[in-house]
Image: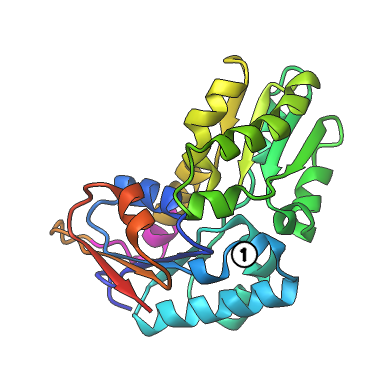
Amino acid sequence: MINENPIGLFDSGIGGTSIWKEVHALMPYENTIYLADSKNAPYGLKSKDEIIALSCKNTEFLLENNCKIIVVACNTATTNAIKELRSKYDVPFIGIEPAIKPAALQSKTQKIGILATKGTLNSELFHKSVANHPDVTIIEQIGHGLVQLIENGDMNSAEMEELLKSYLNPMVEKNIDYLVLGCSHYPYLIPQIKKIIPPQIKIIDSGEAVAKQTQKILEQSHLLNLTNEKSSQIFYTNSEPEVLKTILGNCENVIYKNF
C-alpha cells in the first residue's frame, strides 16, 4: 500500500468531522477522505444488522478510493460493527468508543454521566466497558433528537437548549463530576453544554485519543505520509453540504462531493 494513500473516515453524517479535525490537526500532511452518510443518520436508532450493513457499504466505498486505514468516526458503528469490519476487510480499523475509562479512573464522586445514542448504550461493547468499572455509578442518557438537530444546523436553537437541559440537569443533581460524550456529533454541543452544567464537571470526548491511535497504527504499519506536501481533504455527503461547510469553516484544500 502506498503511504500517500488517504486516511478514510466515515460517520452517520457530519458529527465525525469532530474526529477528522483532531486527525488533521495531528497529521496535517495526510490526505483524507471523509464519508458523511447523512441520509441514514442517526445510526443510533437502527438495528445492529442495519448498522453493520451500512458500515460495510461505507468501508467498501472508502476502499474503492484507496484508503490505507479507516477510522470509524461513529460511536454507534464502532460499538456495533467494528468486530465484523475487522474480520471482513484487510485494512487497519480505528474505532471510537465512549471514554468511560479515563472518566471512571479520575472521578472523585464515583459518578459519571454518559450522553450517547440508543445504539451505543445498548451495544455489547459498551456494556463490557461499563462492567470494567463496578465501583463507579454510570448514569446513562440517550440523546434523543440531538443528532437530527445538529444535522439540520440547529445547534443553537431553543429546542436544542431544552433537550440538553432535560438530559443534563438530572445528571448534575446526581452529583456527576465527569460527562462523557458518547457520540461524535456531540462535541459540537460543548458550548451549549457548558452553559447548563457547573464548571467543575469535566467534559470528555474521544477525538484526540482517536487521532493519536490512528497515528500510532500508521507508524507501526509504515504507512505514514512522509512527503510534507500540501494534503487534500475530500468530503463526500449524500445530503446538502451546507451544514458540513459551515462546521468545517475555512479549511484549506477541501473538496466537497456528493455520492
- The structure residue drawn at horizontal position 24% and vertical position 70%, both measured from the top left corner, is 4
Residue 172 drawn above or below residue 181: above
Report the magenta residues as a range: 216-225
Residue type for callout 1 = Ala
Residue 179 drawn above or below residue 143: above
Quadrant assignment, res 50: bottom right
The verdict on residue 70 being magenta is no
Q: Where does residue 198 sit, x and y in percent of width and height? A: 62, 16
In the image, 209 versus 10, the foreground residue is 10
Q: Where does residue 106 sit, x and y in percent of width and height? A: 67, 24
Residue 10 drawn above or below residue 148: below
Tell me which colouring the rendered structure shows.
Answer: rainbow
Q: Give the labeled residue for mark 1.
A: 77
- The structure residue drawn at horizontal position 60% and vertical position 82%, both measured from the top left corner, is 88
| Residue 59 visible in rendering | yes
- The structure residue drawn at horizontal position 16% and vertical position 61%, both measured from the top left corner, is 227
Kind of element beneath mark 1 = helix
